[in-house]
Image: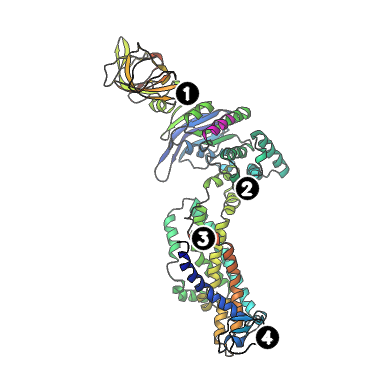
Amino acid sequence: MSRLRIENLQKTFPDGTRAVKGSNLCIDAGEFVVLLGPSGCGKTTTLRMIAGLETPSGGRIELADQDVTHLRPAQRDVGFVFQFYALYPHLSARENIAFPLRAAGVPSHQREAAVNRVADRLAIKHLLESRPSQLSGGDQQRVSLGRAMIRTPSIYLMDEPLGTLDSGLRLDMREFIRSQQLELKVTTIYVTHDQEEAMSLADRIVVMDQGAIMQTGSPASVYDHPANLFVAQFVGSPGMNLIAGCIQQNGRPSFRPHRSDACIPCPAVTTAGDATLGIRPEFLRLDPQGPLSGKVAMSEYMGSVTFLHIDVSFGRLVVRADPNEMLRPGDSVRVNYSAPHARIFDAAGDAL
Amino acid sequence: MKHARWLVIAPYFLLTILPLAWIFLTSIKVQEDTNSRTVKFIPSLAKEIPDDSRRFTVSPDAYTRLEEKHTGVEYGFYRYLANSVIIGFISTLASVTLGTCCAYGFSRFKIPGARDWLFFILSTRFLPPLAVVMPILLMYRQFDLQNTHLGLIILYTSFNLSLSIWLMKGFIDEIPRAYEEAALVDGYSRWHAFVRIILPHARTGIAVTAVFCLISAWNEYGFAMTLNQQQAVTVPVYFAGLQGNISGIPWPQVAAGIIVFVAPVMVFTVLVRKHLLRGVTFGTVKQ
């Protein structure tokens, strides 16, 4: 299948907003790539430029080794799934799914066959005669997936397709989309602001913020080795604990948080000076012998795990704890941490 | 509160329905009954009715004799009705078609100075149309457009275009862009997306706009009278022409003509009244 290459892609809207500030991205055939970022980070604009619904202000888009930067959407051979489904309300589900084939002039008996095949795959055969307004959100999104799937385009573009669904349905549809993609092996770009969704779906995550790509990598590498403070905070729920301080090099490097005398061991780095230490909640643990002392401020019981918010001398830390831990706000605790899992970010916020 | 509103509705209803009712009663009278000494307003099937009775004999004469030529005018009623239909419908078709295309452009594309253009278009309605009757008369004389159907069609189209653009823009703005975008991605050209997606969704808007355009062209009198003496005379001008009839105004026929003239527009308006309400509020009412 095809690959997508984006070079120095830019978009400035007429009101002066720089939505995308020169992105570079290469996507391999069959890859499932998720564009992840907060709203307004330019992920949807990027997707719309790839589809041809938005004209880039600069840069180049190549699909299957062909420059498509200035082609009309119809000439690009992409399948687009919209956040609000965008099913044509005046057509039945069947006609909606068949719509792209009518554009291509496929004869009606072949259209029928294709619609039935896709409907089988999506398990929506019994819904084919309904109008979109008679369908639930999940079913509407299935029909909309069907409309994108019927043509086997060279790339699927999905703009927060699950954003409007209830959380239970979301999980089902998430699994469903992933299984479909694995089976069909179609290159897919999926936009979301939900980092959990991104982690579970992606072969590769592209984290964006304020129109720029912050980091590209597998879910594990983005989670374990965030490239900068933004990614560290945005990816993971809750995000990384970030402690501002400075690194001291006297024999072994150690980290001293601002406004504190505590000195905590830190991974081997060669620099010194202002830095931020990041540590995931799962690498902090309650330990009577731990070097950090604090008071429980809040406890979030999640079922399989409890997140304790603990006030220490230099700020607040979120610690993942056993759900059986019966601690109340105000209780004194000591916290230990696993130094090799700490990440150090320099004064500019980039990972060392 | 529920009853109080009838205090407003009832008088208004009577005010609008009474003239129509009176015209209808006149249209089923014979000429003598329309200017008798006693006011006759109770229809009756009896043949012989005393002169001083409030009742009158119902007669279909006026309707069957609509085709009759009256002194002072050249043709029968239907000829003028045909003029009205030709001019009204073609100008409506033209203003709705042009208006829809313009509105689509204003709604979907970035047009330099779009706001100023839209204001300019609206501003063409600020003057009463008759204020420009003299220049238009001179222009039409120059271009030989007097006494032609085309002349009135062009005139009504241009007057209605501003209304049509503004109304249609309101309706098209409400159609989510995603529908078209889906069609564009699915392999349709902009034109096909417009025809296949926008037009079906804008049906209500088109119907509403058409009614407004048709009504204004249908009822227009001032220009129709000034620019026409014979060929393209419309029904309103024809009725006015009967006023100077030496043998007395043929009231039953005039009334019958009016009924035939307003009935189609009235029926249609009642049929689409739900959509009309949305039209006059410029799409500001959300269901």
Magenta stretch containing residue A129, yes or no? no
- The amino acid beneath tag 1 is Gly
Expressed as whole percent of the image width and height from the top left, the position of residue B243 reads: 55, 85
Query: Tag 3, which chain?
Result: B
- Compared to residue B193, the image places residue A209 above or below, namely above
Mark 1–mark 3 distance (CA, rounded to whole Å): 54 Å
Circle 3 or circle 2, nearest the eye: 3
The mark that comes first in sequence, 3 or 4, is 4
Circle 4 or circle 2, nearest the eye: 4
Question: What is the basis of the colouring in this image?
Answer: rainbow
- Residue A91 tag number: 2
- The amino acid beneath tag 3 is Leu
- Residue B47 tag number: 4
Expressed as whole percent of the image width and height from the top left, the position of residue A226 reads: 42, 23
**Residue identified by numbered label 1:** A303
Mark 4–mark 1 distance (CA, rounded to whole Å): 94 Å
Mark 3–mark 4 distance (CA, rounded to whole Å): 46 Å
| Drawn side of residue A134 relative to residue A346, left or right | right
Pick the residue in front: A24 or B195: B195
Query: Tag 4, which chain?
Result: B
- For the image, the number of numbered tags is 4
